[in-house]
Amino acid sequence: MKSNLEWILAERRGSRIADEFGLAAFPIEPRIIAERRGIAVESRPLTSCSGCLVRLGDQFGILYSSELANEGMVNFTISHELGHYFLEGHAEALFPDGDGIHQSSAPFRSTDPREREADHFAVGLLLPEKLFVKAIHSVGNGLKAVRSLSATCNTSLTATAIRFATLSEDAVAVFVASGIDVNFCFLSEPLRSFSGLQWPRKGNRVPRGTATAQLAGRSHDVERAAGLSSRCSFSDWIEGGPDHECIEDVVGLGRFRQTLTILWSSEPLEEEEEADEED
């Protein structure tokens, strides 16, 4: 699923908000922004959503599910709701009558444009590009690097992996799947610019024989956040992608029953050159 202008602008808006509130070092604390805007943030035993933005006249509040697995997911949920608050036109569209409650689901799963914009706002807010690029250079690659960055930034593995893929100078692909069905993917610039590549789509199948397919078949391991690693090729996952060996790191995402896959290679990609015709 390709990034579009609205997503890029939402990410930049999130990063600008962090800067405007003087949050210039990891971890970025979205609760500070909410507090300074007079937005109450509270935990509730929500089961049908991950978080809510509440409006009563000119007053706003944020609720997040007490079922969220870690503080990184809590931070993303709060930041997503702040996206609805700060992004132009969102509050008016979500609360046409002035008051109400707007529910949000797991990140990057909704097809609603405003939900996707709020997801990207959250990524930009929690992981500002300039700060994150500096951090990337000291952590290596793959799932190990994403785990390290997630701990430093106090962000979820999924949000961290997405930002890692989109800003990495190496060949990196990130997939989130439910069972053997791909939900979404993000590619680094070296892969995005590879000629002839067909962007993976929602509903594509996880390739057979991969570590991800193996883990997906073991639901208990997915729920307990177990991981696997193996070798494959980018072309196994991406139609028209480079026939270039990569590492496949995959980890279960707990109660969401999804898997997070990171394909990576630190070796530069090479485009195949067409053979010159002989005279």
Image: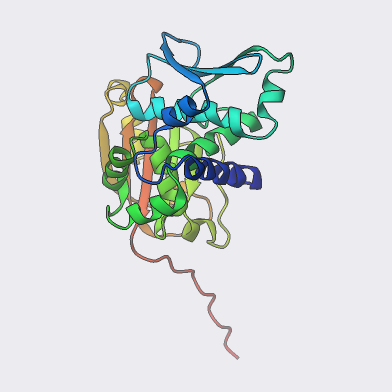
Taking 153 as reference, is 192 above or below it? below
Q: Quadrant of residue 259?
A: top left
Residues 216 and 26: in front is: 26
**Quadrant that contains the N terminus:** top right
- Left or right? Give the position of 37 relative to 248: right
Disc tally is: 0
**Quadrant that contains the C terminus:** bottom right
Residue 192 seen from this side: yes
Residue 3 seen from this side: no
Taking 35 as reference, is 17 above or below it? below
Q: Residue 5, percent across and down?
A: 65, 47
Q: Residue 270, percent across and down?
A: 44, 69
Q: Which residue is rendered at x = 43% and y = 39% of the image? A: 126
Q: Residue 48, percent across and down?
A: 50, 11
Residues 101 and 222: in front is: 101
- Left or right? Give the position of 102 relative to 227: right
Q: Which residue is rendered at x = 30% and y = 25% of the image? A: 218
Residues 81 and 208: in front is: 81
Residues 247 and 160: in front is: 160
Q: Quadrant of residue 98?
A: top right
Colouring mode (rainbow / by chain / secondary structure / one colour): rainbow
Residue at the right extreme?
96
Q: Which residue is rendered at x = 48% and y = 39% of the image? A: 21
Residue at the bottom extreme?
279
Q: Residue 258, percent across and down?
A: 40, 27
